C-alpha cells in the first residue's frame, strides 16, 4: 500500500502535530509520512530525513493501518514518571561537575 497524496495543508498539519510531541522520533515519523504524501518515494524520504528506509516504511504502514494515532510513540501511556524533581536536581548538579571534583 502507498500513502495517498496529501494537500499542502494536510502535510503541514501532520508536521505540526509531530513537532508538538515531545519525542523527536515521533516528529520524524510525522515528517516521513508528510513527505510520502507529496509523492516522494520511500528511499527519497529516507535520504532527505537521514533515516533508515525501514523507519519510513514502518511509519507509512502504521499511518495506513491506524491513521495519525499510529504515528505517536506507543509508549505514550506507559505510566507515571519514574524520576522525580529531586532526582532531576541531583542529576543536574552531578553533571555540572568535573571528575577532578571527586
Image: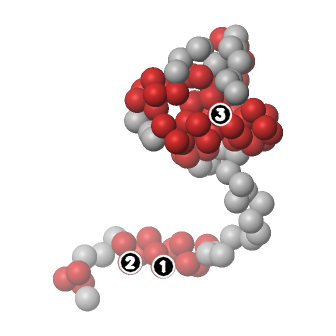
Q: Viewer-proximal residue, 100 or 12?
A: 12
Residue annotated with mark 1: 90
Give me the C-alpha separation between circle 2 and circle 3: 41 Å
Q: Position of residue 98 (x, y in %)?
A: 25, 76
Rendered position, 40 above or below 29: above
Q: Nearer the viewer, mark 3 or mark 1?
A: 3
Q: Residue furthest top?
A: 7
Name the N-terminal-most of marks 2 and 3. 3
Q: Position of residue 80 (x, y in %)?
A: 75, 70
Mark 3 residue crowding within 10 angstroms, few (<14) / some (14–19) / many (20+): many
Please report the residue visible at 61 percent of the width from the left and 42 percent of the height from the top. 58
Disc number placed over residue 60 in the picture, else none? 3
Disc 2 to disc 1: CB gap under 8 Å: yes
Q: Position of residue 83 (x, y in %)?
A: 62, 75
Quadrant of res 60? top right
Mark 1 residue crowding within 10 angstroms, few (<14) / some (14–19) / many (20+): few
Give me the C-alpha separation between circle 2 and circle 1: 6 Å
Q: Residue furthest front?
A: 1
Give me the C-alpha separation between circle 3 and circle 1: 41 Å
Q: Position of residue 42 (x, y in %)?
A: 52, 27
Residue annotated with mark 2: 94
Q: Residue furthest left?
A: 100
Amino acid at each position: 500500500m502507498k500513502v495517498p497524496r496529501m494537500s499542502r495543508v494536510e502535510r503541514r498539519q501532520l508536521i505540526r502535530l509531530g513537532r508538538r510531541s515531545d519525542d523527536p522520533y515521533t516528529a520524524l515519523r510525522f515528517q516521513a509520512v508528510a513527505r510520502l504524501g507529496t509523492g516522494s518515494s520511500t528511499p527519497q524520504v529516507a535520504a532527505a530525513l537521514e533515516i533508515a528506509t525501514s523507519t519510513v516504511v514502518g511509519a507509512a504502514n502504521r499511518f495506513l493501518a491506524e491513521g495519525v494515532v499510529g504515528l505517536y510513540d506507543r509508549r505514550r501511556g506507559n505510566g507515571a514518571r519514574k524520576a522525580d524533581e529531586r532526582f532531576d536536581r541531583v542529576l543536574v548538579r552531578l553533571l555540572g561537575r568535573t571528575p577532578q571534583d571527586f
